[in-house]
Image (spheres, coloured by chain):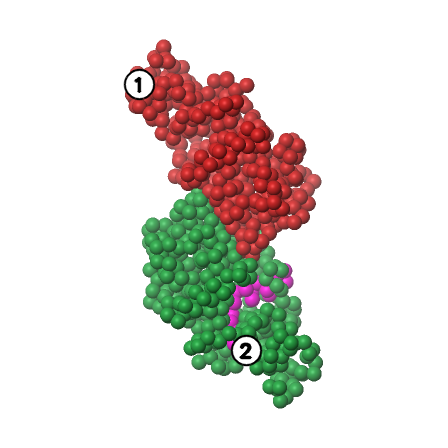
Chain colours: A red, B green
Amino acid sequence: MLLSKTVLPNKTWTLRSFPEKQFCATENAELLEEDLDLKNVDDDKIIVEVHAVSIDAFIRTMLDSNANPAHGGVGLNCPIPALGYGKVIRGNDKFKEGAMVTGLMQAAKYSVSGGEGMQKLVSLPRAPSSVFLHQMGISGIAAYIGMFVSPRKYPRKGETVVISAAAGAVGCIAAQMAKLCGARVVGIAGGEKKKEFLLKELKLDGAVDYKSTTKTVAEQLDEQCPDGIDFFFDNVGGSTLDCVLQRINLHARISICGAISQYDSGKINNKQSIVGPAHYIKVAETSSTISGFNMMHYQSHFLKAIGYLSWHYYRGNIVCPEHVEKGINSFAKSLEMLFAGGHCGRLIVDISGDIE
Amino acid sequence: MLLSKTVLPNKTWTLRSFPEKQFCATENAELLEEDLDLKNVDDDKIIVEVHAVSIDAFIRTMLDSNANPAHGGVGLNCPIPALGYGKVIRGNDKFKEGAMVTGLMQAAKYSVSGGEGMQKLVSLPRAPSSVFLHQMGISGIAAYIGMFVSPRKYPRKGETVVISAAAGAVGCIAAQMAKLCGARVVGIAGGEKKKEFLLKELKLDGAVDYKSTTKTVAEQLDEQCPDGIDFFFDNVGGSTLDCVLQRINLHARISICGAISQYDSGKINNKQSIVGPAHYIKVAETSSTISGFNMMHYQSHFLKAIGYLSWHYYRGNIVCPEHVEKGINSFAKSLEMLFAGGHCGRLIVDISGDIE
C-alpha cells in the first residue's frame, strides 16, 4: 500500500461555465480544492498521482454545451480531462499499485477513474516520460497518420509541403517528417520568434508569418512556394486553408489534422458558422484530395508509428521542444495560452515537479 | 471532294456579352449567320459538318470574363465551343474527308478548326453515334473516374451511396454504376417527374426531391439514409454538399465531379464568393476523404472506362436517356435549360437532324 493516509488533499480543474467563444481560464474553469477520501472511492477505481498533462486543442472541443459526441463532452462542474501520465497509487484488477500509466485523466493532482483509456507507460532507455506526451505519443502519432496513412500519397522528393501551425506540437513533428521524405518544407506560424524557430531549429526551407504586418499569407506563400504546393498538412483551417487551396498543384494532397482557427470561436461544435473552404473546387480542377483523420480510427497503425518515431527520436531527426508550465494551478491558463499561441512545441503542465 | 460549293451558309453561336450571373440566351449569345467561304479557310484547317452537340455545364464556366485557365475561356464575339460529333467535309493531314470525328467543336453548323482535341469517332455495332456524347463518352467516363478511379475506395455492397443531380447525364450513369457495385443508392434531383425517373427508370433505392415544399433535403436524407452515407458523388456543391457531410459515416468518400449550383451564379471563376462546405471538418471526425477530379488528368483510364461502359451498354445495365432539342438555333436556349434543370439525362442538340 503506497498510501499511508486515507485522505489526500486534491486539486481538480472543473468546468464552471461553457465558454461562449474563447476559453477564459478565470471565468470558465475553477480549481476545486477538496480532500479525496479513499473510503468514498469505489474498489474498482484506480487513483493516479498525476505527474504531467499536456495541453491539447481537443480539450477545447469538449467544453461546449453542444459538444460533438466524437469529441466527448464535459458537463458543468465536472472535471476537465487531459492526456497525461502518472503513478497508480491505488490499483484495481487491471492496474497495479506503483505502475506508471498514461492516457486520458483528469486535470488534477489525483485522478480517479476506472482506468478506461489508460495504458501502462512503457519506458524507453534515455527517454524521459514526457516524450510520450509528444513525439512518441499523441502528437507524433497524429503527425504520422496525417502524413503517411490517411493521405493518398505521402510527400516525395522534389515536392513542396506546407504545414500550418508548424511551430505547434503536431506541426513541428509533421514538418520534420516531410523533411525526412526529401520534400521542400514551408511552415506557417505566427510571429518572428516562431519563424526563427522554423528556420533555425527545425531547418525548414521556408517560413510564413501569418502575423506579419507587411505581407499577407498569400504573398508570402507565393514567394516561398514558387512551384505551387503538393502537400498541405493543416492544423488551422479558415483562411489559411483557402490560401493554400488556391496554390495547389495537380494531384495535391490536403491532410486535415485540425482546424484550430475554429475551435476557440465556439464554431467547431456549431458547424453552420464554420467558414468552409471556398476554394474546395480547386480539388476537382487539380484532381486532388482532402483527407481528414481521427487518429482513434487508425489504432492498428500506432505500433508502426511508435517504431518510426522512436527510430528518429534516438537519431535526433525528430525533436519536439517542450514548453513546461509548473504546477496544477497553471493548467487553465495554459489552455488559454494554447490558442493565444505564444509557445513553440508541446505545452505541458508539470504537476509533480519532476520534469527538468 | 465532298464539297461541290465553295461557299457554305453557316450559323455559329457566338458570345455577345459575358453573363454576370445566370446565362441568358437572348442577351449573352448571338447566332451569327455568315457564309463560310472556303477560299478563306487555311489549308491546315478542317471543316466539320456538325451533326450533334451536347450541352455541358463546363461550357458555362468558359463564358466568364475571368474564366479559370483550367476551363479555357471564350472571348467576346468568339464562337461558343461544345462537345459534338460530325463529318469532316474538308480534311487535312490528320483527318480525311468523309471521316466521322468527335471532340470539342463550335456550336455551329460547320465547325472550323485545326482538329485539336478531336478524334475519329469509333462506331460500334447497334450503337447510335449520340451515345458517344453520353454513356460511352464524356458523361460515362466522368462517372467512371469519379466512381472508380479518383476516390479512395469505390462503393461496396451494404454501403449507402448518394448522388446529386442524379437525373443528369453524369449523375444517372454514376447512380447505375453504384447499383452495379451492390450499394443502396439514393439520388437527389428536383421535382416529382425526376423523382419518379430515379425510382422507376433507374430503379434506385431512394430519391430526394430538393424542390419539395413539404420536406427539406436534410429531412429526406434522414429518411432515405437511416444508416448514414458512405459515398457521395457530388455534381452540385453548396448546401447539398453540407447536408450530406453532416451524415457521413466512418471512412466515407466524397467524390467531387462538379458544383453546378455555383456555375450559373458567376461564382465558379470568382471563388471568394463560393460557399465552401462548412461541414468539411466532418471528414476529419470520420477519417473520410474528399477527392476531386478533372477527367483530363486520367486519360490513361479512358480505354478501361469505355470497355466497362460498352459491356454494360450492350447488357442494358447502364442507360442514359437523351433529351433532344432540334436544330442549331436551339443551342443557346438549351444551355439555359441545363441550369433550369427541366430535363432528364443527356441534353443534346441535333443539328443535322439524324437523331431519331
**Given the image, on which type of amino acid does mark 2 rest?**
Met
Instruction: Judge left or right: residue B114 versus residue A171.
Output: right
SS label for mark 1? helix
Residue at left 46%, top 20%?
Answer: A51
- Segment colored magenta: B49-67
Residue A9 percent across, percent down from the top left: 40, 15
Q: How many neighbours does mark 1 have within 10 angstroms: few (below 14), some (14-19), or many (20 or more)?
A: few
Disc marking residue A40:
1
Q: Viewer-proximal residue, A222 or A175?
A: A175
Question: Comparing marks 1 and 2, which lies closer to the viewer?
Answer: 2
Taking the view exactly as shown, the residue that stands out farthest to the top is A4
Q: Is residue B222 left or right of residue A305?
A: left
Give the residue at x 48% y 33%. A306
Against A11, is B265 above or below?
A: below
Nearer to the camera, B49 or A60:
B49
Say which amino acid is labelled 1: Asn
**Residue linked to disc 2:** B100
Chain hosting mark 1: A
Is B10 contained in the magenta span? Answer: no
When the figure is inspected, residue A73 is found, relative to residue B81, above or below; the finding is: above
- Dot 2: chain letter: B
Which residue sits at x=56%, y=72%? B119
- Residue that appears at 40% across and 67% down: B312
